[in-house]
Amino acid sequence: MDLDLYLVVDLGTGGPKVGLVDSSGTLVDHVVSPVTTTYAGDGAATQDANEWWALILRDAGRLLDEPGRARRVRAIGVTGQYGSTVPVDENGLPTGPCLTWMDTRGGPWSKRAVGGPLQGYNPRVALAFIRRSGGAPSTAGADPVGQILYLEHEQPGVVAKTRWYLEPVDYLTMRLTGVASATHASRLAMWMTDNRHLTRYRYDPVLLDLVGLNDTRLAPLVPFGSCVGTVRPDVAAQLGLAPETAVATGVPDLHAATIGSGASGLYDTHLALSTTSWISCPVPMKKTDILHSIASVPGLDNDHYLVINNQETGARALAWLRDALTGPGKPATIEELTALAATSPAGANGARFTPWLAGERSPVDDKGARGGFSNLSVTTTTADLVRAVLEGVAANSAWLFAAVERFTGRRLEPVRLVGGGAQSTLWCQIYASTLKRPVIQVADPLTAQLRGVAHVAASAVGDATLAEVPQTRPGRVFEPDPNDRTTYDEVARDLPRRFALERRWRRSSR
């Protein structure tokens, strides 16, 4: 029998994945398309939201072109990056580029709003935010508060045409339905909801006032996983979908990864090795560790939370190295790179890599941090460099992992790996040995979030419940290798020391 289908989108920083997941939770088909990020010296890091939409329509059309598929689609779900801002008009059309989570042009305005002497924050303002929402806007401006303040103060032409400031996932649901909406979860990076009371679907007026904003351009809040509406007639006609096809609320990639990894029970842990990296698990309480940029945010229901943190560079470090390597005979794909890294021994013959290519957030918030290689010699090979990148990223995760375990108050194991980097069995083994925990390579880790958001879409139309998250297919288990323990212990201990030295050097050179 032909099973029902769910059309799903995962809008990563590198571009959208569009897929079809059936009612058994199986990914039937998917397409991946790249997008361009435009950087500028003033801190700009933008993407064209119209480009996203065009690619998604094209790729969805290709997937649904196979006879019989379109009529089987029950609902549509969207997940993806968050901490970004798309300004749109009353019809959901962009009035300017998307300011991504890497855009720091709002930093000066964020510092005026929340900055001060306590680790860069005004103590009174920070305490109000932490008490209510659990976190606070970044003084670097790399979040929706900084982005909106930048637009409001420096882009009056854009603001004059703008009806809503939307997160990317909420922008795509509006393009699909014509309805502006958001949830506590999709708005988590703004820190503008009272997360002590998850059934209050409104923005907190005290927090808005503290940063000089109001909610007139913020989309109405609705319950997580609910149905926003049905697909617009023109979109339905273009894709061949039934007019009654439902669209679920936008879902942050954190939540989609939690479901897609099968780690949805209390303290079940997953680690995302994507463009960025994070470590998360469901927890029963609202809590904040301001020293290490770890908090718990609204979770999959109104009774639980999810641990949130972020490391600005994850598998992106390997892609960066790939792009930096030029010349004849150099590997051109991630698969070739990791195969080459396997020819270098544990410890990369002493080569070290620090992965802070875009600064860092957790466990130390420092946008000025920079990465690099060290301890190189004339005998260092390309294989050593690649292995050093794999080990450096894993060591950075281990640094954060220790703080996350202190945050939860318990030992977290096993750890489920998702994301593009988790496709590498070598990297999975390095993670197991570095974390000193069993690591599960989730089946099809690159598309785990597509499966996760499909479950949200199914719940929006009553085909499933968020409380009944399906278990993923058994993945491959990697145990720590005792032969590598001493080597990886040293690599992991060395990384925080290098962070402190790099920071001290930056301060002394000012």
Image (cartoon, grey):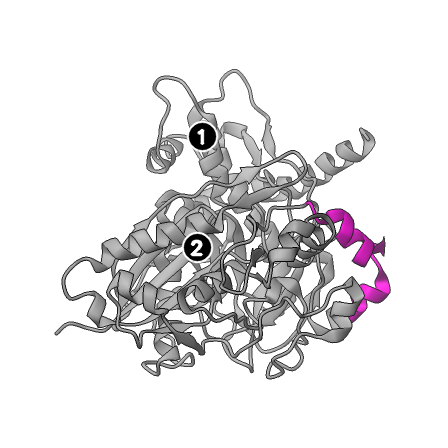
Q: Amino acid at mark 1?
A: Asp
Q: Judge whether residue 123 is colored magenta.
A: yes
Q: Residue 284, can we see it?
A: yes
Q: Amino acid at mark 2?
A: Leu
Secondary structure at numbered mark 1: helix
Residue 200 found in image quarter: bottom right
Q: Is residue 21 above or below residue 196?
A: above
Which mark is on residue 323?
Answer: 1
Q: Residue 362, can we see it?
A: no
Q: Which residue occupies the foreground of this view, 315 or 162?
A: 162
- What is the x, y in percent for residue 383? 42, 28
Q: Is residue 452 above or below residue 480?
A: below
Left or right: where 486 falls relative to 362 = left
- What is the x, y in percent for residue 119? 81, 53
- What is the x, y in percent for residue 98? 55, 50
Q: Is residue 441 above or below residue 491?
A: below
Residue visible at 54% across and 73% down?
299
Residue visible at 75% across and 54% down?
110
Which residue carries the number 2 mark?
Answer: 11
Boundaries of the magenta span: 105-128
Residue visible at 65% across and 63% down?
190
Quarter of the rendering occupied by the C terminus: top right
Residue 344 found in image quarter: top left
The crowd level at tag 2 (other Cα within 10 Å; few <14, some 14-19, many 20+) is many
The crowd level at tag 1 (other Cα within 10 Å; few <14, some 14-19, many 20+) is few
- What is the x, y in percent for residue 68? 15, 66
State which mark lies toward you, 2 or 1.
2
Mark 2 vs 1, N-terminal side? 2
Q: CA distance from mark 2 to mark 1?
A: 22 Å
Q: Judge whether residue 193 is colored magenta.
A: no
Which mark is on residue 225?
Answer: none
